[in-house]
Image (spheres, helix red, strand yellow):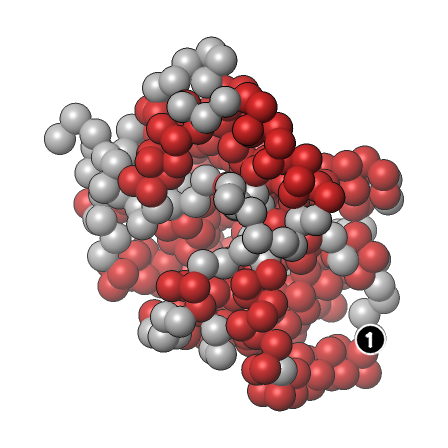
Amino acid sequence: MKIYLINMLFLLIWAYCFKNSKRMYCIFAATQWILLSGLRHFTVGNDTLQYLVKFEEVKYTSWSRILSNLFEYIKNPFAEHSFKDPGYHTLVKIFQIFTDNYRCFLFFIAILFTVSMAVWIYKNSEMPWLSFIIYSSLFFAFYAVTGHRQTIATALIVFIGYKYIRERKLWKFLALSLLAFLIHKSAIVFVPFYFIANMNITALKSVFILGGSFVFSLIGKPIYAPLAYTLGFGEEQIEESVGGAGTYATILLLICIFTLICYPNVKERREDSKFLYNAMFMTIFTTLFVYQQQAFMRIQQYYSLFIMIMIPEIVMSFEKRQRALVSMCGTLVLIFYIIMQNPYYKFFFM
């Protein structure tokens, strides 16, 4: 845990050093997270060792088998396959043309995801330091030290794809979505956002969406397990109790509800406010499922990342003299959350 707290301390130091340069701040902050992700011990992250095994399997799998699995998957992506999400294995096989070192592959994923995220934050966040603090407390545990397939898919469809959603370039967005889907099929849940993002927000529509989401989360239980299997979540994930995921879901719901209350202030500041708030509605909708099925944490993560943009916008809506107090209070809460979680970290050379 100490490493993560030191990391957050440096994120605050860089915020002071580069308060007049968003670009430099994002470069330094991204570099920190790339190093933390790439230099971690293989015991850090629930799936890091499992992905090491898969990495070695691909090394000794022929190109003909890799491509055969990929083409079979394209024909029927929801059938049973020997290699799940073969687009990921194809990417690994391509990477192994250059090197078969798993440590290098960890750095490759860290660079792809973190640089994409840093550019996304740079272009969309009014307070990059706060965006990185939010990431470093709420999202890093999956994207920085655990996931491979969904981490790559998220970088493609959310961080890069958001540009095409805003510009209303459907075919470019769908091309990225297809690539992300081949790497992790759960990416399909973000595709509807292209059509939802630009919807007008009214009080009546807000009540309808929130009420409908709550009702569906209660009566839709029979479809949860089949949907989770269809999206490629393992049986062990589906049968887990909600546990700590319920606490995490509650935090996200409270944040989203708070952002909805502040919508009028943000609407005056940003032309893409509808996009951001519709992302919050989708976060609420998908997060409610988590109370019934922990596997759906994987789904809501595509939308909940927009909290990194929304929270800074809300802080900016306060009067200038109040912003420092509000942002620092929020930062202290996030630091306290990290301390309570007590996440494990170890460098590979320790």
Is residue 112 among what the camera can see? no
Residue 306 appears at what percent x and percent y?
Answer: 60, 54
- Give the residue type that dot 1 points to: Thr
Q: Is 47 situated left or right of 179 in this image?
A: left
Is residue 160 positioned above or below 235 on the image?
A: above
Q: Nearer the viewer, residue 302 or 307?
A: 302
Q: Secondary structure at mark 1?
A: loop
Residue at image point 26% right, 43% down: 44
Q: Nearer the viewer, residue 41 or 223?
A: 223
Residue at image point 41% right, 23% down: 59
Is residue 155 positioned above or below 192 on the image?
A: above
Q: Is 235 situated left or right of 339 in this image?
A: right
Q: Quadrant of residue 180?
A: top right
**Residue at numbered disc 1:** 202
Residue 301 appears at what percent x and percent y?
Answer: 54, 57
Residue 113 appears at what percent x and percent y?
Answer: 52, 35
Badge 1 crowding class, 10 Å Cα cut-off, few under 14, some 14 to 19, many 20 or more, is few
Quick one: which residue is furthest to the top in this view? 98
Is residue 97 among what the camera can see? yes
Residue at image point 63% right, 54% down: 79
Q: Is 115 situated left or right of 216 in this image?
A: left
Q: Quadrant of residue 288?
A: bottom right
Quick one: which residue is furthest to the left in this view? 350
Q: Quadrant of the C terminus?
A: top left
Is residue 306 positioned above or below 281 on the image?
A: above
Residue at image point 69% right, 85% down: 211
Residue 110 appears at what percent x and percent y?
Answer: 44, 31
